[in-house]
Amino acid sequence: MASTISAATMTVTLTEEITLNGSQQGATNTIDIASVNEVSKRIVTATTTEQVILAFGAVVAAGQFLESKVVYIRITNLDNANHVGLIFRNEDSDELSVKLDKGQSFIYNGDLEDGVVDTMDAAATAVTPNAFADLVDVTATAHTTACDLEIFVACI
């Protein structure tokens, strides 16, 4: 059966609005991501125990995205009081940890042609420029009590 879904262009717009001393200091930046043909939007509950919220691989599997197709990830903490720790792990078992405070969003941009393949590196000391590995998963751990996260993933 042939798909009846036509790929579309996704537009992402980031806007900061602030006026200081009567002068607008904000900015708006927009990017169009062409050929998006799959999106996933869901709300998950992050508990105080680390759990995988996103997984990526060379094949599509239950709960796993095709790593070469993921071009955009947004994770928003919907909680109004607590933060969540996010851990991004690559195929070399390098980990990057990010604190996502109440109400805030984190955007992970995949490569526009190759998805999350060769997009992440981390080290306790200096990293080698442009020596990236494939992102394999993202985990979440709520700080004190469970927090709801909105997860949006776009694929080409």
Image (cartoon, grey):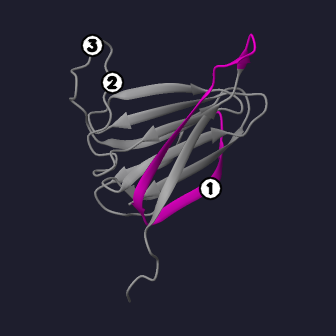
Q: Is 64 a magenta residue?
A: no
Residue found farthest to the bottom:
1
Residue 131 picture location, percent across and down? 21, 29
Distance from disc 2 to disc 1, alpha carbons, whole Å, reads 28 Å
- Going by the numbered disc 1, the residue's amino acid type is Arg
Residue 102 picture location, percent across and down? 71, 30
Residue receiving disc 2: 122
- Going by the numbered disc 2, the residue's amino acid type is Ala
Disc number placed over residue 24 in the picture, else none:
none
Residue 63 picture location, percent across and down? 47, 58
As helix, strand or loop, the secondary structure at mark 3 comes to loop
Q: Quadrant of the N terminus?
A: bottom left
Disc number placed over residue 42 in the picture, else none:
1
Residue 7 picture location, percent across and down? 43, 69
Q: What is the magenta range?
A: 19-48
Q: Is 50 placed above or below 70 here?
A: above
Distance from disc 1 to disc 3, alpha carbons, whole Å, reads 36 Å
Q: Identify the residue at horizontal 52%, vertical 26% (top origin).
A: 98
Residue receiving disc 3: 126
Residue density around tag 3, few if under 14, some if 14–19, many if 20 or more, within 10 Å: few
Q: Quadrant of residue 124?
A: top left
Image position of 147 (left or right of 37): right
